[in-house]
Each structure stands twice: as structure tokens, then as C-alpha cells.
Image (cartoon, rainbow, N blue to C red):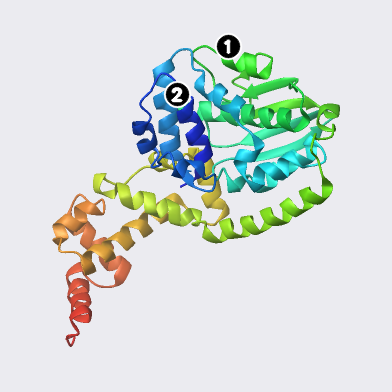
Amino acid sequence: MGAVSAIYARKQIEHAVALPNKAPLYELVGLTPETAQDPAVMVPIADYLELMETVAASEWPDVQFHMKTSASMRCDEFGLFGLAFKTAPTIQQGLQRVCQYIRLHNQVSEFTAEQQGGRYMWAMKGPEPVRLGLALSHEAALATTLTLCREATGRDIYPQHVQFRHTRDGLIGPLVAHFGLTPEFGAESDAMFFCVDQLAEPSVVGDVAIWAYMTQQLDQAMKEVVAQEQPLEAQVISEVAKLLSGGVPQLSEVSAIMGVGERTLQRRLSERGKTFQALVDEARQKLAHQLVSGSPYSLVEIAFLTGFSEQSAFSRAFKRWSGQSPRAFRKAAQGDVLGLPQT
């Protein structure tokens, strides 16, 4: 499952002015006011989106908290990541670093930066905005980038154009005020466009030597993150296993929980030579083996917990997986645990 830095959750909570009791909001994302101070702490994307929607409901239809949050962001709050952006010689170079190291703070979305004729496009590639939380999160991501650009240059930079894939209910005055224009909704991508000359301007505290040092530190941090990340296949198997007691889950259900678009998840699995159905089968197999060998549940109960409506269907599948009936597998496993001779 993807995750985002606790800094985003903390700042959204701070700006939830219509919800003065912050304790339930911190509980929603599994944080405390203390743990939320560390940008290295990550919040599951599903929890973060629920937080966004909870705060939005308290302000609807004039949702302002996410733009206030974006406007309050400062480079220093992002640790090495923010300092590398702030000390980049130019904004364009800072944005390129964001593309390269964004996974340190956002394991859900990717960003690209490229020149298109006389314009420079900063685009976000994230889950399809199928729910309000994702739409608000995408708006906040672009708005935060703009805030950091303004801090780095010391100027009120405004994009030439801003666009989002989602359509939008509710008032958009806060977005217009922050971006300095009316965004386009229902577009093909989430992106901001700047004049090339804007991003070629030097940063106020740009320093090549410090920037190079920060980049080295970020490289090391990225290696550690990559080493700790759970493979996508393992994430899918884990989420499927949690849902099996309610029947075999659909791809759409799992992708929504993971905060990834259905087609995006399908494509990423295909790139790895996997299919969703094969991972569902693997999840059922692993859970079945665990429950048969190490739980007190009856085989009827295990059949239900692994998504089967009948024990006979479960038994046939189990024999296909292991070459043994569930009863024989359990007997052999219990013999191993007890140190008994097997017959």
C-alpha cells in the first residue's frame, strides 16, 4: 500500500479549523502530535484520503483547508528533501530533484518535469481521482509545489495554466486565489505550466556545493527506502488476504484500498508479469496453509475465511496447491510441531 509523509497529514489537521478537537483526526491516521512532527514517518494513503474527506465534509462546499495547508508549507519542514530543493541553483533544477526523490515523502504519485516549446510542464502521475480525497490531494500536491517555488525564489510566481483530471463540485475560490487563475478541470493530466524563463531564475539561497552535498545524502536515503519497500505483488496479496472472509475481492476493491487506479494497478502488475487473479490465488493458498497448519479453526471455517462458499471447493483447491488434502496437511503439520513420527 502506498503512503505519504506525516507532514502532509499534520498540516491538514492543523488547518482543519471547523474541527477543533484534533485527537480523532490524529487517531484516524495513526499519529500523535509528536510522531506527526517527523517527515520520515509515513501514513498509509487510505488513511490519509479518509482524513482529507473528513475535513472536507466539515467545510463543504467552501473547502479551504488543503489550500491553506499548501500555502503554509516550507522547504525546511521536508528535511533533506526540502533543503535540496531550496539550495538548488535554479527552480528548474530543484523540480528535477523533486522528480528524482519524491518517493522519500510520497510513495503514491510520481512527477515529471519537461520543457514543451516555450513552456515548462510540471505534471503529476498519481492514482485516478475516483474519490474526493484523491482529487483534493492532487490539488494540494500542485499547490504545495508552487508554494515551495515561491519560497525558493522569494517571488510570487504564478503558472500560466493549471489543469486537473477530476471534475469538481463545491467552490473553487481558494484554488483561484492560490494559483492566480481558474484551473481547468476534466483535463487529460494533472499539471502546471510555467514560462521557461520563470524557472530559470536563481534561487535566493542557491548554492552548488550545498546542493551537491544534499543530493548525496538523498541518494543514500533513497537506497534505504528502496530496500525497505514491499514489492507491489506482496502488497496486493496482503490486501486480498484481509478481504477474503467477505468473499473473493474484485480488482476495483483492492485498488481503491491501495489508493491506486484500477487500470494503473493492472498495468503495473502486467509489467511485472503478474495478474490480479494469480495473486488472489496465491493469497488464498498462503492463508489456507497458515490456517490449516497453525490455527484451531475447523476446515469449514477455514474454507469461509479463504473465500470459499463450500468446503468441497476449498478441499479441491487445497489439494491442487499442496498435493494433499487439508486434513492430511494438518495432520502432517501437527506431527512436525509435536515432533511425532509421521505415518
Answer few, some or many: residues within 10 Å of disc 2's Cα (few below 14, many 20 plus, some between 14 and 19).
Answer: many
Q: Is residue 46 above or below residue 71?
A: below
Can residue 131 be seen here? The reply is no
Closer to viewer: mark 2 or mark 1:
2
Residue 173 disc label = 1
Can residue 209 be seen here? The reply is yes
Taking the view exactly as shown, the residue that stands out farthest to the front is 34
Q: Position of residue 76 (x, y in %)?
A: 64, 39
What amino acid is labelled 1 in the image?
Gly
Q: Position of residue 152 (x, y in %)?
A: 74, 33
Q: Which residue is mark 2?
A: 16
> Dot 2: what SS?
loop
Q: Position of residue 230 (x, y in %)?
A: 49, 57
What amino acid is labelled 2 in the image?
Ala
Q: Position of residue 209 (x, y in %)?
A: 82, 51
Q: Is residue 110 above or below residue 218?
A: above
Looking at the image, how many numbered discs can be counted on the residues? 2
